[in-house]
Image: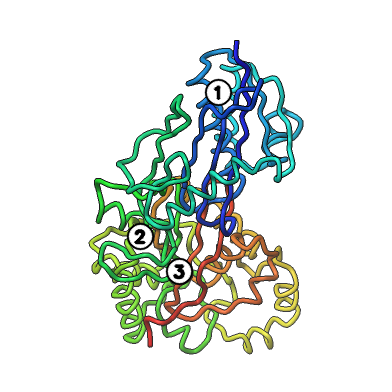
Amino acid sequence: MTSYIVEADGGSRGNPGPAGYGAVVMDAADRQVLAEAAEAIGVTTNNVAEYRGLIAGLTAVLDLGGEGAPVAVRMDSKLVIEQMAGRWKIKNEGLRPLALEAGKLARRLRVTEWTWIPREQNRHADRLANEAMDAAAKGLAWRAGGTAVQAEPRTSPRSTSNGSATATGSGTAPGSGTATGSGTATDLSAPSASLATAQQRSQPSSGTGWSPPTRVATSLLLLRHGETPLSVERRFSGLGDAELTANGLAQAAAAAERLSRDPYRLDVIVSSPLKRARQTAEAVAQRTGLGVEVDDDLREADFGAWEGHTFTEVQRGWPAELAAWLADPNTAPPGGESFEAVAQRIQRAQERLVERYEGRTVLIVSHVTPIKTLLRFALMAPPVTLYRMHLDLACLSLVEHYADGQAVVKSFNDTSHLR
């Protein structure tokens, strides 16, 4: 029986960024190349791309040798090799489904070794991954031999015995500055999920070597509500249900006008239950034709006895309590809610929305504390970060969440629509 060697690699130009993988299957006796596979997989991380390369290599061995074929697996990813060998635990839950898929394939084969090799010894697989990414950046699909062709409709990756593999994918490189269906250039802070969706709508029957929206980021657009009487006077505004001023309604309309145009192709609008946020969300809903989903966890922090007071008034009336609140996120205002308590419910909301609307663009209309908290989570920053950020009324920020659990802040406190 022929024994095989799989060498696989994956890379991301940005981590996360436009990514791709490569895999080569060789005869273990003479290292003759029997099959190659490569694919550009949209915006994701190095580790995801590396796992995808492993999966493609194992699939190619199954196609060539069938069940029980002996194979030695070699990669320059220490993480993937050690996790697949069972020596390292999988701590990133986003990688677990990929590891499980690779494990199922491995059990159908007879893996004789999981070996880490230096990058210079993995040049073949590395070259394939780069060829796939280079082709996709030009709107083309990878083909064995290092050539690129006009992309074909998406099918499952399939290795062939003559050393080729079908290149798959659809959409464009999210956030790459290429043109959307409207023919206008997108900016780099546009939601990746929206760009992928736009390309699918404009080119429904062809692809470019990039992955479908379920593999791109889940884009969370964060919109702070417009002006209220309390914000004009710079007063604590928590659970009090203030309405928008005339200027606040105009700010909401300006945001709605922006979000109704390319590159913003919203899929979902989710709002805090408080009136000022709902009025802002409804303005966007009217322009986009979407409904508004209300999530109670997105409400502003409860400032308790400080509601409606200015900072100076609180400083005079509750000096010790204010000092404690500013020093410790676990401390709540009198009769109110701590920032730590807010963070717990915001984390619930984030996890719920990212899971429910995977690969889509979600507009979250909320308040200063929830939006700062979502940004803090993405940056993996400590609670004190809340005191180091400023958010203007009706500003937009963008956070992208990827399949392996990582997140990236792509824009912050953008008020260009108000100018």
The residue indicated by pointer 1 is 105
Q: Position of residue 89 (x, y in %)?
A: 72, 35
| In this view, 167 is above or below 62 | below
Work out how far the residue at label 3 is from the one at label 1, CA to CA, in angstroms: 38 Å
Q: Nearer the viewer, residue 282 or 325?
A: 282
- Tell me which residue sits at (60%, 33%) in the image: 99
Q: Is residue 384 visible?
A: yes
Q: Sort mark 2 into few (<14), some (14-19) or many (20+) by Cα contacts within 10 Å.
A: many
Q: Nearer the viewer, residue 322 or 70?
A: 70
The residue indicated by pointer 2 is 269
Q: Is residue 400 shown left or right of residue 340?
A: left
Q: Nearer the viewer, residue 141 or 358?
A: 141
Quarter of the image containing the N terminus?
top right
Q: Amino acid at mark 3?
A: Leu
Q: Sort mark 1 into few (<14), some (14-19) or many (20+) by Cα contacts within 10 Å.
A: many
| In this view, 381 is above or below 143 | below
The residue indicated by pointer 3 is 188
Q: Nearer the viewer, mark 3 or mark 2?
A: 3
The reply to whether discs 1 and 2 touch (Cβ–Cβ < 8 Å) is no
Work out how far the residue at label 3 is from the one at label 2, CA to CA, in angstroms: 22 Å
> What is the number of the mark on residue 338?
none
